[in-house]
Image (cartoon, grey):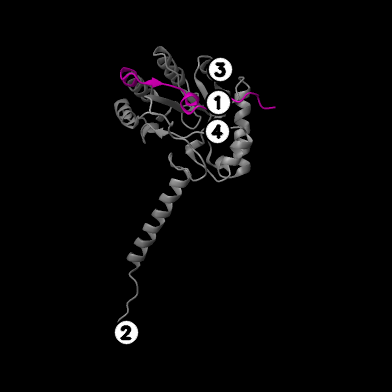
Amino acid sequence: MNRSRARDPRTSGLAAAVAGLGVGVAGYWRLMSPYSQAWGHFPYRGATSEPAVALTFDDGPNEPYSSRIATLLEDRGARGTFFQVGQAVRRHPEVTDSLARSGHVIGHHGDSHRLRTSLSRAALLEDIRKGQQAFAAVGLRPALYRPPWLLRIPALRAVLFEEGLRPVSGEFCHVLEVAQPGAQRIARRALAKIRPGSIVIFHDGFDGKVAERGRTVEAVEIVVDRVCALGWSLVTIDRLLGVPAYQSTLPA
């Protein structure tokens, strides 16, 4: 008598789901984790034991929030690093120019902040070069690049080398910050992550578009005041990592 039984389809489905989840987690870690070094050096923290922190701001310029963040930093003798999107720079070139003149560092965060521009070598190169043109229009050629969503493909390293750019990662201040939870919640999570050499990612915009970022501004103020009260230094990425902020020549 054959006692074998067909596999329970529910068990098979569960196993497939678990396997799929494992593949998804592994893929996320390699391609989008702030900490992954799978495709080459991708610094998420400075190699220092000194009490120094870099606060960074992605997806702008987005007014009035970018300027409000810059002002509160300047009022405390600090400067930040703003990874900006080319299309937003075209919308607010005067803001990008003002930030740079005030001593903040401007980094490259893509031109369109669209997923399709990050999935192939050709699309990535075109997007980066279009972004460089937007920065060149205000007299800047960033040397620092943070990919949108921190997405890295195998071709990214070669493209950045070709364009004279260095990749920069960091740690997100709060996983839900873009959804604007309370300022205190954002600030508490950000402060919990701060260590010597930390690079903390906030968002003063949203994918290069107009967005409400009032709670981020409030959270940044809380974080800055707390860090300053502890006697720590707030520095720009180039100083933290010991690399140039800008390239010496503008693109043709």
Against 34, is 3 above or below?
A: below
Foreground mark, 2 or 1, reads 1
Examine the rendered structure and indicate whether residue 104 appears above or below residue 8: above
Residue 53 at least partly seen: yes
Q: Which residue is mark 3?
A: 97
Q: Name the side, left or right, on which 252 lies relative to 202.
A: right
Q: Amino acid at mark 1?
A: Pro
Question: Which dot marks residue 244?
Answer: 1
Q: Are marks 2 and 1 in contact (CB under 8 Å)?
A: no
Query: Could you tell me how far apart the alpha carbons at marks 1 and 4 are, in whole angstroms?
Result: 9 Å
Tell me the magenta residue range. Answer: 226-252
Residues at badges 4 and 2 in contact (C-beta under 8 Å)? Answer: no
> Cα distance, mark 2 to mark 1?
73 Å
Q: Which residue is mark 4?
A: 166
Q: In the rendered structure, which disc, 2 or 3, sits on the residue that comes first in sequence?
A: 2
Along the polypeptide, which appears first: circle 1 or circle 3? 3
Q: Which residue is mark 2?
A: 2
Query: Label 1 neighbourhood size at 10 Å, few (<14), some (14-19), many (20+)?
Result: some
